[in-house]
Image (tube, rainbow, N blue to C red):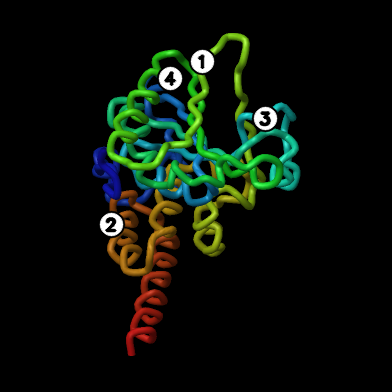
Amino acid sequence: MRYFKLLGQSKAQDSDKPKSDNTLLTANDIPAEFLCHAIFAGDKFHDLEAAYGRVEGVVKTATGYSGGTTRKPSYREVSKGTTGHTEAVKITYDKRVVSYTSLCDFFWEIHDPTNKHFLNFGLSTHLRSAIFCSTEEERKQAQESKIRRQMKLNRRILTKITPFSKEIKYEFFLAENQHQKYYLQKYYKLCGNLSLRSTQQFVDSYIACKLNGVLALDGELILDKLPQLATTCLLPKQCRSTCDEIIQDLKTSLISHTS
């Protein structure tokens, strides 16, 4: 599994100037036959989305709800534990770069699948550990990954792997706008620079996916990764300036905490 590594500049090298359209902000330039989807649930979806956003080959992330019966539930309804849904993240990835097995292996690293709270019923059942498989092959790969991880632990993994069934299809419903790219949205000026306003824009944006992942890190790691991202993705001038402001503010904050 490769993560915390930014994608190459193959397309960016064709021009010395940032493009004025949204080409760099989406994954639409990747042929559809190479794009695959995966749905994971592991405690709070904000942190799960950010973690997968840092994985090389992941081009889109979206927070939402899966595993329940109510159509288009709200966060309030899901949080009450009455709809059967859990907070989940839908990932779009380039299978040429990262495999489904690797995404499953990474899943165990970014949350505690042995947390006994995942066994609760009623309130808080919206925070569970689950892998929602869309094919029998995905179920096999997820199960094999779970077994490999279980062999390294002395506590039982409580993650539920949904078996593929033509009769049972778990839908994924997008969460509300304020829950998409949670860490990026804390920097409203940067969102404005990227013209991200609607839920779908936050979901479709490749750069938002990567920025959200970096901005969820601790301060010193942000200082290391954000300049790389700003350069690699050839952010527009206004975005680079805002990133520079974020970096400077973090440096000032870190200095004040150490003095």
User: Residue 12 location in percent, x, y?
Assistant: 29, 44
Q: Amino acid at mark 4?
A: Arg
Q: Are marks 4 and 1 in contact (CB under 8 Å)?
A: yes
Residue bearing the label numbered 3: 68
Q: Are marks 3 and 4 in contact (CB under 8 Å)?
A: no
Which residue does the image show at 42% across and 24% down from the upper left?
Answer: 36
Mark 1 element type: loop
Mark 3 element type: loop
**For marks 4 and 1 on the same chain, the one whose residue lies earlier in the sequence:** 4
In-front residue for pair 157/244:
157
Q: How many marks?
A: 4
Q: Amino acid at mark 1?
A: Phe
In-front residue for pair 6/74:
74
Residue 139: assigned label:
4
**For marks 2 and 1 on the same chain, the one whose residue lies earlier in the sequence:** 1
Mark 2 element type: helix
Q: Are marks 3 and 1 in contact (CB under 8 Å)?
A: no
Q: Amino acid at mark 3?
A: Gly
